[in-house]
Each structure stands twice: as C-alpha cells, then as structure tokens.
Amino acid sequence: MSGPVIYFFLPEDFPTILCLFTTSLHFLQFLSYAILTLIFDYKIITGREDENE
C-alpha cells in the first residue's frame, strides 16, 4: 500500500520542483545574458562614440 502512495505523491510534487528549478535556471541564464549584452552593447556604443569624436 505504501508503494502506490509514494508513486502517486511523487509525480505531483516532483514536476513542480523540477519546473521551479528549470525556470529559475532559465531566468538566471537570461539575466546573465541580458547583463552581458548590455555591458558589451554599452562598450561598443561608447567605443564608437569615442572613435567619432
């Protein structure tokens, strides 16, 4: 009896934990990518402005 209970409890909680973990990972990945893009874009823009001046 304890087998099916564990089996039915796991699929309910496990995907939500997995979902939270993957979404947080994706969010961190996106955040770091966005920050890197902003920094590099800023450097390129300032570099171009310095070259023009």
Image (cartoon, rainbow, N blue to C red):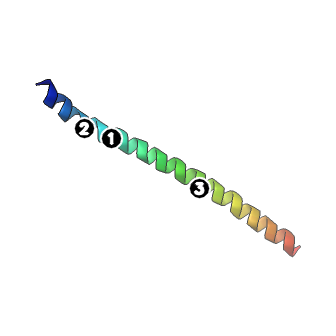
Q: Amino acid at mark 2?
A: Glu
Of residue 37 and residue 4, the one placed in the foreground of this image is 4
Q: Residue at x 30, y 37 (%)?
A: 14
Q: CA distance from mark 3 to mark 2?
A: 32 Å
Look at mark 2 in the image and give the residue it sits on.
12
Mark 2 vs mark 1, CA separation in Å: 7 Å
Please say if 19 is above or below 49: above
* Mark 1 lies on residue: 16
Q: Residues within 10 Å of mark 3 (few under 14, many from 20)?
A: few
The answer to which image quadrant residue 42 occupies is bottom right
Judged from this view, the residue extending furthest toward the bottom is: 52
x, y percent for residue 39? 70, 57
The residue pinned by badge 3 equals 33
The residue type indicated by label 3 comes to: Tyr
Q: Nearer the viewer, residue 6 or 30?
A: 6
Q: What x and y, as percent, mark residue 18?
A: 36, 42
Report if the CB atoms under discs 2 and 1 are less than 8 Å apart.
Answer: yes
**SS class of the residue under badge 3?**
helix
Residue at the spot 15% in from the left edge and 24% down from the top edge: 2
Horizontal side of 45 relative to 53 (left or right) equals: left
Q: Earlier in the sequence, mark 3 or mark 1?
A: 1
Q: Earlier in the sequence, mark 3 or mark 2?
A: 2
Label drawn at residue 36: none
Amino acid on which disc 1 is placed: Thr
Which part of the image, by quadrant, shows the C terminus?
Answer: bottom right
Cα–Cα gap, marks 3 and 1: 25 Å
Label 2 neighbour load within 10 Å: few <14, some 14-19, many 20+: few
Which residue shows up at 75% across the image and 67% down it? 45
Direction left: furthest residue: 1
